[in-house]
Amino acid sequence: MAPPPNLANLGRRMARPYYVTTPIYYVNDQPHIGHAYSTVAADVVSRYQRLRGHPTYFLTGLDEYGLKIERRAKEENLAPQDFVDRMATPFRSTWEELDCAHDGFIRTTSAEHRESVQTLWKMMEDKGDIYLDDYEDWYCVGCESFKTEKELLEGNLCPIHQKPVERIKERSYFFRLSKYTQPLLDFFEAHPDFVQPDARFNEVKSFVKEGLRDLSISRTSFRWGVPVANDPEHVVYVWLDALTNYISALGGPAPKGIAPLYDEFWTSAETITHIVGKDILRFHAVYWPAFLLSAGVRVPSQIWAHGWLTVNGEKMSKSLGNFLPPGPLVEAFGADVLRYYFMREVGFGQDGDFSHRNLLNRYNGELANGLGNLINRIVASIVKKNLGGRVPRLRLDALEEADRHLIDKAKASACDAARHLEALAFHRALDTTWELVSAANKYVDTTEPWKLAKQGEQQRLEQVCYTVLETLRWLSIMLFPVMPNKCNELRSQLGLPPLLPTVGVDLWPSAWGGLGPGIETRTAGLLFPRFDESQERSILERLGVDKEPQPGLRAK
């Protein structure tokens, strides 16, 4: 049986570097599930690319400058640096709790970042794209950006933060953004996948087509920022400062040979993917590429803008008491289950709702009853009792139609899941993976290995068990980017070592029969023990949602 078209080639091209980033998070408050959603998505991308053998760098970090931080620090009676130092710890701890294995954690108050910002400024200045002038306009402190009057709601409210904007007039350096209206449109035309999803890209293109105004890129009304090198009365506009993190974390911008990480993961990378929330798309899809075009620096490959998460149907808000930190959820369900729910529940790029009951439904219906049941009924039951706990031998000459059907399904699912993960369509990758889980459970129901054992049909029993065990091996790889710890636990039950991604080695499943005969399987506790009604009530009460109404399982 030949593998489906292109499966053997996916990821087997020359192992060129892959760079994925989250937005850097503003440290005016504690991390919540919105931050976690972006970071888990980037971690899944990173783990998938590593499985395919690609050198991969995953960056996250913190945005620590700006008027909003200066004011917040003052409210806390702290110096701004002391405030951001204190706020950095919860973010680091949260990513550890969620097993987000970042390679770099950038803090914009670092000396290296400051030097990179000043270098990029100089490169744009040398291009003739920075000039000094007076500026007056409406400013939203929450967004750290100016607003035109047509963007504001009635009462001069910011449309995102629903708070009044401030009128600011000051001397400012400007970037000649208007000069890049046509170059940006030309770039968009040449790179039709630059922004995803497509609907967001259409919004970006419409904004640029209206014509761009020159952009104020310095401030004198506050001090907490990167100083303009040749005019220290000014600090660099926080968004120019913040966006530079994607290259400053790699040691850039720099001439070739000076910063190896920058050479590998920016200059030479096959793919550079920025994952951001839709509210900051304009900064990434308009301002950032314009700055880079001005400086003569490579523009990233793609900006992926995901939607917002509500909580149980309501916008996250401290006043509503639904501002959810990830920690208690990890404690209740485990990191892998929360990661699975994030990637399964919402189509990436769309708005979605976080529901505690939907999480429980997903857990019991898919993880416990689906994958967990498949493992338990074969590894802990049939193989242990009837095959001495060892993997039987594969007999390709004895395959029956049911066996071939499941093997074909595994190959098709692996191909489709890889294609969807390449496109950051996480929910679709999990859809096709769960079709394989369902097909494997149906295969067990149809072949009835317990009857084969009772009737003494040893050869057929071994063939059925091998087919399911090998399917589980494939699933342990296909699900690894989303649930790394649970997948390694599954591999342990199959008698296999943990997955260790290696540059240049493609571990994605494609050839049937990789599970060697005679391997001793290991029974352990249930991988996904089912929660009964009493346990569900207890979990919801601990999480403060015991009065949440019971919705049905959300459609995917």
Image (cartoon, rainbow, N blue to C red):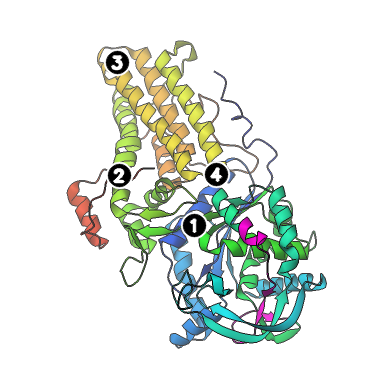
Q: Secondary structure at mark 4?
A: helix
Q: Secondary structure at mark 1?
A: helix
Q: Disc 4 or 2, which lies upstream in sequence?
A: 4
**Amino acid beneath label 3:** Leu
Task: Classify the position of the C terminus by image quarter.
Answer: top left
Q: Is there a contact, CB below 8 Å, between mark 1 and mark 2?
A: no
Q: Disc 1 or 2, which lies upstream in sequence?
A: 1
Q: Nearer the viewer, mark 1 or mark 4?
A: 1
Q: Nearer the viewer, mark 2 or mark 3?
A: 2
Q: Secondary structure at mark 3?
A: helix
Q: Disc 3 or 1, which lies upstream in sequence?
A: 1
Q: Position of residue 323 (x, y in %)?
A: 36, 66
Q: Disc 1 or 4, which lies upstream in sequence?
A: 1
**Amino acid beneath label 4:** Tyr
**C-alpha gap between disc 3 and disc 4:** 38 Å
Q: Quadrant of residue 282?
A: bottom right
Q: Quadrant of residue 9?
A: top right
Tally of numbered tags: 4
Q: Tell me if mark 4 has few (under 14), some (14-19) or many (20+) residues whose alpha carbon lies within 10 angstroms of its own.
A: many
The residue identified by callout 4 is: 48
Vertical arrangement, residue 545 with respect to residue 111, above or below: above
